[in-house]
Image (spheres, rainbow, N blue to C red):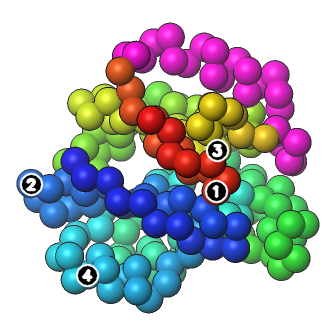
Amino acid sequence: MRIEKFVFGPVGTNCYIVINEMTSECFAVDMADCPQEFVKHIKDAGLCVKALLLTHGHFDHIMGAERFAEIFGCPVYAYEGEENILCDPVLNASATMLGQSYVFTKAEYVKADTQIETAGFQVEIIPTPGHTEGGCCYYIGEEHVLFSGDTLFHNSIGRTDLPTGSGCSKYSSISDKPKSRAFDVRIISLTSVLPTTT
C-alpha cells in the first residue's frame, strides 16, 4: 500500500489516494476539489481508480466528488447515516460557511460494520458520529490503517458545534470503537488544520 496526500479546497482539506502497488488500482478518501493537475497525476501514474470514500458530508470533503466520479467512472461511498448532510447545504455547511450551496446526491450508502472491497483492499466502515451524525472511519485491517476523517486529529478531535454534531456521540464513538481494534494502527486524519496523525 502507498498513500498519497493532496491538499485541496477552500479550507485546505487533506485528501488521499490509496494505491495498491501490485495492481496499480487505487481508491480516494474525501475530495474537496478535483483540479486538472490532480487528474493528470493519476492518469500519468497509470492508476485505475476504483472508488471514492467519503468520511462525512461537510462541504470541504465533498466538493470535488462529482467531478472525480465523472472523470474516473467510479462509485462514491458514504455511510448511510450521512445522507441528510450530503444532500442539505445548511447541514453540510456550504450555505453558511462557504456562502454558496453545494450538495452531492450520487453517493452509494453503506451500512455500519460492513466492508467495501476495492482496489484489492477490504475496507471496514466504522460509524463514528459526533462531528456529524453519520460520519465514519475507514479501517484497512491488513494494513493497520484507519482513515479518521474529522473524527480524530493530531492530539485532538473534530469539532462538534456544527449541525448534527454531538459531543456526547463523539465521546462515545471515540471511547468505544478503538477497544475492538489493534493498538498498532496508523491513523490518517483528514483535518485541514493539523498534520497527519501517526
Give the CA separation, mark 4 to mark 1: 26 Å
Q: Is residue 95 visible?
A: yes
Which quarter of the figure is the C terminus placed in? top left
Between residue 177 and residue 107, name the one nearer to us.
177
Q: Is residue 55 magenta?
A: no
First reached walking from the N terminus: tag 3 or tag 1? 3
Amino acid type of the residue that numbered disc 1 sits on in the rendered structure: Ser
Amino acid type of the residue that numbered disc 2 sits on in the rendered structure: Met
First reached walking from the N terminus: tag 2 or tag 4? 2
At 35% from the left edge and 60% from the top edge, which residue is drawn?
4
Give the CA separation, mark 4 to mark 3: 28 Å
Residue 43, picture quadrant: bottom left
Instruction: Check if mark 4's residue and mark 1's residue have beta carbons within 8 Å.
Output: no
Q: Residues within 10 Å of mark 4 (few under 14, many from 20)?
A: few
At mark 2, the secondary structure is loop
Residue that carries the numbered disc 2 in the rendered image: 22
At mark 1, the secondary structure is loop
Residue that carries the numbered disc 3 in the rendered image: 150
Look at discs 2 and 1 and give the one toward the viewer: 1
Amino acid type of the residue that numbered disc 4 sits on in the rendered structure: Lys
Residue that carries the numbered disc 1 in the rendered image: 192
First reached walking from the N terminus: tag 4 or tag 1? 4
Q: Is 112 left, or right, of 167 in this rendering? A: left
Q: Examine the rendered structure and indicate whether residue 16 appears above or below residue 174.
A: below
Amino acid type of the residue that numbered disc 3 sits on in the rendered structure: Asp
First reached walking from the N terminus: tag 2 or tag 1? 2
Q: Examine the rendered structure and indicate whether residue 80 appears above or below residue 192.
A: above
First reached walking from the N terminus: tag 3 or tag 2? 2
At 60% from the left edge and 14% from the top edge, which residue is drawn?
176
Magenta range is 160-183
Residue that carries the numbered disc 4 in the rendered image: 43
